[in-house]
Image (tube, grey):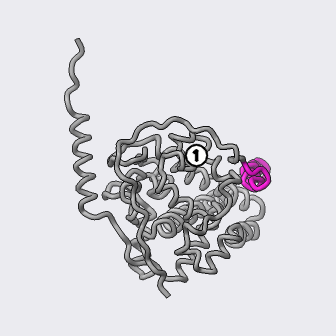
Amino acid sequence: MAAAAIPTIPAAPAAPAAPRPAVARREDEKVDLIGSIPFFSVHLACLLAIYTGVRAVDVALCLGIYAIRMFAITAGYHRYFAHRTFSTGRVFQFVLAWFGSTALQKGVLWWAAHHRDHHRNSDTEDDIHSPTVRGFLWSHVGWIICDRYTPTEIDKIRDFARYPELRWLNRWHPIPYIVTFAIPLYLFGGLPSLVVGGFWSCVLLWHGTFTINSLAHVYGRRRYETSDTSRNSLLLALLTFGEGWHNNHHHFPGSANQGFYWWEVDISYYVLRALAAVGLVWDVRTPPARILEEGARADAAARAARLAPRPSAG
């Protein structure tokens, strides 16, 4: 049974990006100290490697699990559930949600609903994780451990909330990680594999993906004029399998590829093309010619500006 397609969230109207004044934290924006215990505990548990040691096989597991979950969160949670940039069937939709949940970034409906809000309100006072409005620390991690934003806004994700299996995953989102990775890692290699392959991978994945909220609106180059401060960064794109081409994405969020040109590395998109080749996904959307032509003109103008002779002083 194929999942029905819906229109993607449009980009906000274009306007020159400009620094915004910092907004103080609201009175009801408090860190959920009890609910955040697992998050901070995983960070502390990484230090157990001092006791367990670090084996090559566990480092390989750490990197491999990082890659699987990075694809699941970027291609699944982000490009499919938040933006519907490709189509798939109900079974593979569940697979994407299951592995996305192993990233331990809360439930699939919660994540996608908040991300749609981000695009509607990017870099305004209503954007809950804008670094230019709310600051680095809040945009990086503060908002996600704030009790104000714990509930899932079902009204904003009704297209997927109609699936009972997704509502179940959204409620019990830690289960996929425990079943898929934590228990198998411990059974395979004991505590050393769990610490390095599991806990290290979690922390690297969390802060890798969080950089898109905290850094991709601050560092990098702007190709397109958008109403926010989104930027493109090769370094962030490599860390996050293509998410670092953030200015591209905010200009045209309906594209499955965020690296619009061949030289913009986008690993999640390459995997999606492979999945399309074997029939697991289809209708993989890419930016239309007008978007690519606009970008090419902007790049040419930027190169000309960099090469133009500077006026001499005096």
Q: Which residues are magenta?
A: 31-52
Residue drawn at x 58%, y 72% as measured from the top left: 97
Residue drawn at x 32%, y 49% as measured from the top left: 224
Q: Of 205 and 117, which appears nearest the observer?
A: 117
Q: Which residue is mark 1?
A: 139
67 relative to 19, above or below: below
Q: Is residue 50 left or right of residue 168?
A: right
Q: Is residue 108 magenta?
A: no
Residue 308 pos. (x, y %): 20, 31
Q: Of 159 and 249, which appears nearest the observer?
A: 159
The image quadrant of residue 261 is bottom left
Residue 111 pos. (x, y %): 58, 62
Residue 294 pos. (x, y %): 25, 53
The image quadrant of residue 179 is bottom right
Query: Residue 181: in sight, yes or no?
Result: no
Residue 1 pos. (x, y %): 50, 88
Query: Residue 57: in sight, yes or no?
Result: yes
The residue tagged with tag 1: helix, strand or loop? helix
Quadrant location of the C terminus? top left
Q: Of 19 and 212, which appears nearest the observer?
A: 19
The image quadrant of residue 150 is bottom right
Give the prevailing secondary structure in the magenta stretch.
helix
Q: Is residue 42 left or right of residue 240?
A: right
Q: Is residue 44 magenta?
A: yes
Q: How many marks?
A: 1
Q: Residue furthest bottom?
A: 1
Q: Is residue 251 left or right of residue 239?
A: left
Residue drawn at x 76%, y 70% as measured from the top left: 187
Crowd tier of the residue under label 1, counting other residues whose Cα lies within 10 Å: few below 14, some 14–19, many 20 or above: many
Residue type marked 1:
Ser
